């Protein structure tokens, strides 16, 4: 799979541990997302984005909120003046699902203008 293939997919409802990605799937998808990291317990991925000012930070946050609403998959956000930390996990599977990587790819596309 390529980054473009990942970012053009859409989230689907995923429930139950059988929908969680195995560790090799997590690694393969994470390799497509520059700067994204697996959190220590392996149940989420995160990235910190830096911006020039508050306006640009909030523009990114608002665009990401639009994507989250459309995909019905919502990140945890930590927002500061010139930074935003985005964290994805799928609580209904108890870890990471394909939805997390789809939305992370969308966040990356928003940031880079792809």
Image (spheres, rainbow, N blue to C red):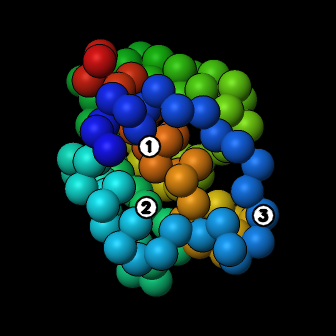
Query: Label 2: few (<14), some or many (≥20) within 10 Å?
Result: many
Distance between the alpha carbons at the discs numbered 2 and 3:
18 Å
Which residue is at the front of the view, 44 or 16? 16
| Left or right of residue 1, residue 86 in this image | right
Distance between the alpha carbons at the discs numbered 1 and 3:
19 Å
Q: Which residue is mark 2?
A: 45
Asked if 21 appears above or below 6 in the picture, the reply is: below
Q: Quadrant of residue 55?
A: top left
Q: Depth-wise, is mark 2 or mark 3 nearer the camera?
A: 3
Residue at 76% in and 49% down: 13
Residue 57: x and y, percent?
Answer: 40, 27
The C terminus sits in image quarter = top left
Q: Please, which residue is most extreme toward the front here?
A: 1
Q: Secondary structure at mark 3?
A: loop
* Between discs 1 and 3, the one toward the N terminus: 3
Residue 44: x and y, percent?
Answer: 49, 66
Residue at 40% in and 66% down: 25
Do the CB atoms of the residues marked 2 and 1 lie less than 8 Å apart?
yes
The N terminus sits in image quarter = top left
Query: Label 1: few (<14), some or many (≥20) within 10 Å?
Result: many
Q: Depth-wise, is mark 1 or mark 3 nearer the camera?
A: 3
| Left or right of residue 30, residue 34 in this image | left
Which residue is at the front of the view, 24 or 42? 24
Asked if 102 appears above or below 100 in the picture, the reply is: above
Q: Which residue is mark 3?
A: 15
Asked if 61 appears above or below 50 in the picture, the reply is: above
Distance between the alpha carbons at the discs numbered 2 and 1:
8 Å
Residue 53 visible? The answer is no
* Between discs 2 and 1, the one toward the N terminus: 2
Q: Which residue is mark 1?
A: 104
Which residue is at the front of the view, 59 or 90? 90
């Amino acid at each position: 799979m390529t980054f473009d293939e990942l970012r053009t997919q859409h989230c689907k409802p995923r429930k139950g541990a059988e929908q969680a990605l195995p560790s090799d799937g997590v690694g393969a998808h994470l390799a497509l997302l520059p700067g994204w990291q697996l959190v220590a317990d392996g149940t989420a991925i995160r990235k910190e984005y830096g911006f020039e000012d508050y306006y640009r930070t909030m523009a990114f946050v608002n665009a990401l909120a639009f994507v989250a609403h459309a995909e019905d998959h919502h990140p945890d956000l930590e927002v500061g003046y010139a930074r935003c930390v985005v964290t994805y996990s799928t609580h209904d599977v108890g870890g990471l699902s394909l939805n997390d990587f789809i939305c992370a790819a969308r966040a990356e596309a928003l940031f880079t203008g792809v």
